[in-house]
Amino acid sequence: MDTRTKPLLPMVLAAALSWTNSAAAQNVTDGRFDDRITGDWGGARTQLSQRGLDMSLAYINEWLHNTSGGERDATACADQFALAFDADLDTMLGWRGASFHVLVTNRNGPQLDARAGLGTLLETHEIYGRGHYTRLTRFYLQQALFDDRLVLKLGRSDVDFFPLSCEFINISFCGALPGYHSNGWYTWPIGQYFANATFRPTARTYVKVGANDVNPRNLEGDQSLRLRTPHDDNDGVLANLEAGWLPVLAGRLDGAYRVGAWRNSVDQPDLLLDTQRQPVPVTGGDPLMRTRSDGWYAMAQQALWTNGTGRSLTMFANLSKSDPDVDRVDQVASIGLWLHAPFARRPHDRLGFAVGQNRVSAQARESERLSNTATGTDGALPHKETPVEVNYQFAIARGLWLMPSVQHVRNPGGRDENNDALVWGLKLSAMF
């Protein structure tokens, strides 16, 4: 962990505990903290929450090893710390409907795909990304209005769209998928200026709009805990729109159905054409600069069955399509299942399965074909790779989970000539 952040947690905890005014002696408890390793701090955590402040520290460690595929067998272990503070300003200051949120992340360790030379389109190692740095990922004000029908957010954050949970190790099934294949969509842990608004016409429907500053300087390691980049450079704006329906079928089967679209105003080079709209591999000219790019996505998650005692089967499906003129991977699709409480004696375990398909755009394929022709190279063109993952998450103790995983990636990089990759993994998750 970055040594500059090590003193932060003890100081914050000391200040927070002094603020509780001997909460432990009052023996106040809250069941919300029963799934944390450190519990309720003898009641201090509950009193902090009652005064408007919630804190959490999460840790994730992912160990991966490939036994086939790539250039060599290799092992990699990466981890992440995430320290969050959530302040209810209504409780603290009487500012009705307002809250403030801060989240600091720290990532460490190597990436398996690079070490083993797997050549995948999307990473097998989801926790790795954007370098080994401490970052201010979120720092924003939230304001709820009209009985929470309208929620506004303003400040710095990762892109607050495509809310897919991260319960797999392969990144094809984890987090904000458009950010992994669309240029200018910066996902966790990158924070940037943003503003969005969510309107809920009913309890089960919503429409959300938002805009994020696209500033490549936010990717740099020395950005760290800064609120601003040195020159506040701006390449453009990423605008998002999302609509959702959150039904409860048959009175007990939760669902979530979402569609979204985005437009990126950043100039990006065309993958195939030059400024005269002729193929670059043929003319050798400068690439045509596209003044914008667009994309869309659809998400579905539905509980299919539950026995009323915690055991349930849930299915999910995702499709994300970006601009084939500028994005090498223009489509990411996945489908999968979660079985919660698979055994009566293991009520907090979860079994997961997912299969996906990541596609190289037709423009990128054509550009490579023309390059091969011009150089006399004979080789198959990239098309699609197919990742599959099966995992089982064990609830080891309060706030501690261990998840063995097996991944199989067919045609890494979308290339038929690449050997399939078999990746074994172990994920440790802890909530303090």
Image: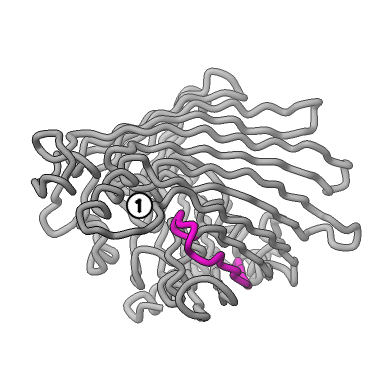
Q: Quadrant of residue 2?
A: bottom left
Q: Residue type at mark 1?
A: Phe
Residue at 71% x, 34% y: name it. 254
- Residue 315 drawn at (x, y percent): 70, 41
Q: Residue 133 versus residue 116: which sits nearer the camera?
A: 116
Residue 79 counted in the magenta span: no
Q: Is residue 293 above or below residue 107?
A: above
- Residue 153 drawn at (x, y percent): 38, 38
Residue at 80% x, 45% y: name it. 312
Q: Which residues are magenta?
A: 412-432
Q: Residue 416 versus residue 12: which sits nearer the camera?
A: 416
Residue at 36% x, 47% y: name it. 140
Q: Is residue 353 visible?
A: yes
Q: Is residue 124 above or below residue 174?
A: below
Residue 418 counted in the magenta span: yes
Residue at 55% x, 59% y: name it. 170
Q: Is residue 198 left or right of residue 252?
A: left
